[in-house]
Structures are given as structure tokens and as C-alpha cells.
Amino acid sequence: KHQKPQDIKEIKVAMSKWETVDFLVENNLADSRSAAKRLLDQQALEIDGKTVKENNIEFHGGETVKIGKKTFVKILLK
């Protein structure tokens, strides 16, 4: 229990800097902007185990993003 799954979905992104809400919506990780904002407000978003609280995120490639309790994705830069 409480471990990352072995087969994590990979997402390729062209930009390294994102607004958190835009990242979630454009990559189909949240149904709408309001749902994405709700995830942020509930602190249900983690990057490499660190809770995301701000609306700007930056990726370097290879990060694991956890959305809610069960959704994991790995970030790859194009």
C-alpha cells in the first residue's frame, strides 16, 4: 500500500514552465479549470512527493506527479 504504481502513464510536454491549472486541464488530468483549482486548493497535487501550493510549476523532466490519491504521471520534456 501507499506505493507508486509500476506502470505510470507518461506525458510529454513541450514547455518546462506551466500555470498549474493549465497543465492539469491541457493534459486531461482535470475535467475543467474549476476542478483543477479545487485540486490545488485541496492540496491534492504532488510533484516528487512535495505538495504543490502555488499556481506556477516548472518541470526539468523525469518528475512524478500525483493527482489525488490514485493518479500518477511521469513528465518527459520534448
Image (spheres, rainbow, N blue to C red):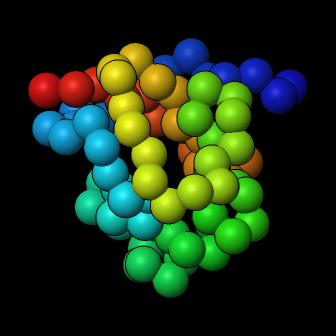
Residue plotted at (61% across, 26% down): 48
Is residue 33 visible to us here? Answer: yes
Residue at image x 37%, y 32%? 59
Q: Quadrant of the N terminus?
A: top right
For the point 58% across and 57% down, which residue is it? 54
State the image coordinates of residue 42 (x, y, percent, origin top left).
74, 66
Counting from the top left corner in percent of width and height, residue 53 is at: 65, 55
Instruction: Give x and y (percent) for residue 6.
Output: 56, 16
Please say whether residue 24 is visible from this viewpoint. Answer: no
Q: Nearer the viewer, residue 48 or 29?
A: 48
Quadrant, the C terminus: top left
Which residue occupies the extreme right position in the image?
Answer: 1
Q: Residue furthest bottom?
A: 34
Q: Nearer the viewer, residue 36 or 53?
A: 53
Coordinates of residue 65 in the picture (x, y in percent):
53, 36
The image shows a total of numbered marks equal to 0
Image quadrant in which you'd find residue 37? bottom right
Q: Is residue 40 above or below residue 31?
A: above
Quarter-of-image position of residue 14: top left
Q: Residue at x 40, y 18 (%)?
A: 62
| Whether residue 58 is situated above or below residue 32 in the rendered picture | above
**Is residue 6 depicted above or below 19 in this figure?**
above
